[in-house]
Image (tube, rainbow, N blue to C red):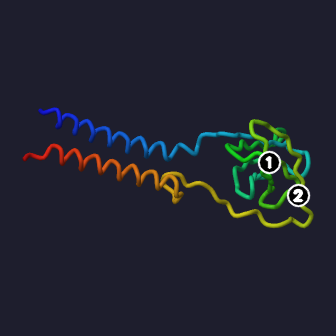
């Protein structure tokens, strides 16, 4: 086997490895918390009772839910947010009066009370679909890695073609 063929085979293997790793990295890159914050409350304080579902929003985007437990409470761990963003809450889909300012790497207790009259409906849930979803970043990354792998394989094939 000539040196060119060995190099072409190694290039093809490298291209496939990059493509496979890119698929997994594109899916998990957004899952790493970079600025986490925890919010919690106790049952029996405010308007939260056992069985209530508390939903937390950062900047109007849902970041998690928790069901209140009797004698304990509820907790939501927010994976990432912008410092200073508004953190708002709903109890069973009804707006709560309280809001917080997002402060990463912290934990804050909140006593939630319902807006009189039920308030405005909760914002529609949105989120990051990751690799399988429609997010532009992860899909563009996978497309670019696929094009790179195809170019590497085509180059390897050209280099090994008999004359």
Label ID, residue 161: none
Assign a secondary structure to mark 1: loop
Residue 25 shown left or right of residue 151 in the figure? right
| Relative depth, front residue between 53 and 14 | 14
In which quadrant is the N terminus drawn?
top left
Q: Is residue 64 left or right of residue 28?
A: right
Query: Quick check: 76 above or below 123?
Result: above
- Circle 2 is placed at which residue position? 114
Label 2 Cα neighbours within 10 Å, binned few <14 / some 14-19 / many ≥20: some
Mark in the foreground, 1 or 2 = 1
Please name the residue shown 80% across and 54% down the image: 89
Percent across and percent down for residue 65 are: 72, 50
16 vs 144: above or below? above
| Mark 2 secondary-structure assignment | loop
Residue 84 disc label: 1
Q: Residues within 10 Å of mark 1 (few under 14, many from 20)?
A: few
**Which residue is at a point 79% across and 37% down the rendered structure image?**
107
Dot 1 and dot 2 residues touching (CB under 8 Å): no
**Which of the two residues, 135 or 144, is positioned nearer the viewer here?**
144
Q: Earlier in the sequence, mark 1 or mark 2?
A: 1
Q: Position of residue 119 (x, y in %)?
A: 86, 65
């Amino acid at each position: 086997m000539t040196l060119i063929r060995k190099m072409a085979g190694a290039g093809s293997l490298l291209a496939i490895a990059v493509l496979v790793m890119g698929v997994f990295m594109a899916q998990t890159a957004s899952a790493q918390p970079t600025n986490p914050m925890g919010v919690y409350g106790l049952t029996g304080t405010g308007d939260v009772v056992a069985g209530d579902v508390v939903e937390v929003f950062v900047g109007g985007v849902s970041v998690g839910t928790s069901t209140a437990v009797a004698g304990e409470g509820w907790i939501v761990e927010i994976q990432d947010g912008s410092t200073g963003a508004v953190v708002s809450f709903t109890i069973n889909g009804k707006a709560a009066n309280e809001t917080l300012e997002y402060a990463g790497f912290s934990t804050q207790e909140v006593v939630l009370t319902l807006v009189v009259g039920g308030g405005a409906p909760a914002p529609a849930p949105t989120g990051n679909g990751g690799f399988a979803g429609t997010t532009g970043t992860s899909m563009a990354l996978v497309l670019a890695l696929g094009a790179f792998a195809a170019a590497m394989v085509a180059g390897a094939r050209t280099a090994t073609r008999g004359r």
